[in-house]
Amino acid sequence: MATVRLDQKSRALVRAIPDSYPEALANFFGSGPTDIELAKVHHAAYVEALSLNGVEVTVLDADHAHPDCIFVEDQAVVIDGHVLLPVPGHESRRGEQPPIANFLSDELQGHQICKMEPPAMMDGGDILRLGDLFFVGRSTRTNDAGIEELRDLLDHLGHELRVVDIPPHALHLTSVSSTPSDQIILVPEGYLTPEAFGEMPEGCEVIMMPEEEVYGCNTIGLPDNKVIIADGYPTVKKALEDRGFECIVLDMGQIRAADGSLTCCSIFY
Ligand code: CIR
């Protein structure tokens, strides 16, 4: 999930699919990409959907030495004038970060860059923002030392952070949830409970979705009540349409195959 507020989602960084994409990590939703040409089609449609809906998109070159490089969300976290560069939780993914860090420091001059150091580790995919309230997943990719570094930054910014334990059958917090608006969190049964998120601020709600639509719980909220969702999750779609959202539906097949969700493929800044 983007860590900029909904009304700040004007630009996004994405990264092209590398030749090595079939070797991407896949242990949860998928068993590995099978069709790289189709993956490129799905990815191009994703970029187009962002562009057509008012987001200025920059596509960084692929890094063929890093099969998971399209999942840029994990590599940098932009929050209110700060760029947090985490230590990615999977060792094979640590080399993806330098070009992303360079791009963001060039684009966001004046932002403060905060670099995490081991043993702290964190994937950006464990961070969820609901207005000015933040959640972080404690997962196989994000440890307590990483969480404390994020907490220091958010304390400094005056934002509350709540920790959500991610069950072993899920990768990240954003793999199984998202905030399509600054008032709503989508959460799947069988993975997390509403209580895991604590008391909701006034006007906010946790919407529970059926377990089999877990992948559909990852969405990208955009201004003007638009939301990008993955194809094939009718309960998620109806819940959002019932609340007045316009859904933009994308086939995520070959992205899902590498455990990637919609939010994983971009960094809003
Ligand atoms: C991985 O296992 O790291 C990638 N195959 C998928 C990363 C998905 N990123 C995300 O949920 N933020």
Image: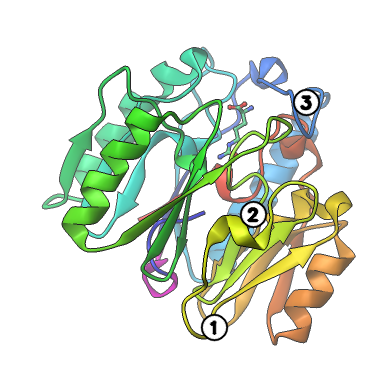
**Callout 3: helix, strand or loop?**
loop
Q: Say which residue label 2 marks.
A: 177
Q: Tag 2: residue type?
A: Ser
**Callout 2: helix, strand or loop?**
loop
Q: Say which residue label 3 marks.
A: 33
Above or below, 55 relative to 144? below
Q: Is residue 143 left or right of residue 188?
A: left
Q: Tag 3: residue type?
A: Pro
Quadrant of the image occupied by residue 48: bottom right
Quadrant position of ligand 1: top right
Pick the residue in front: 129 or 196. Answer: 196
Residue 21, percent across and down?
66, 22
Label 2 CB-ligand 1 distance < 8 A: no
Quadrant of the image occupied by residue 56: bottom left
Magenta highlight on residue 209: no
Q: CA distance from mark 2 to mark 1?
A: 21 Å
Above or below, 99 relative to 207? above
Identify the mark nearer the N-term, 3 or 1. Answer: 3
**How many numbered badges does the structure rendering display?**
3
Q: CA distance from mark 2 to mark 3?
A: 22 Å
Q: Say which residue label 1 marks.
A: 224
| Quarter of the image where the C terminus is located | bottom left
Magenta-highlighted stretch: main secondary structure?
A: helix
**Callout 1: helix, strand or loop?**
loop
Residue 177, percent across and down?
64, 54
Residue 132 visible:
yes
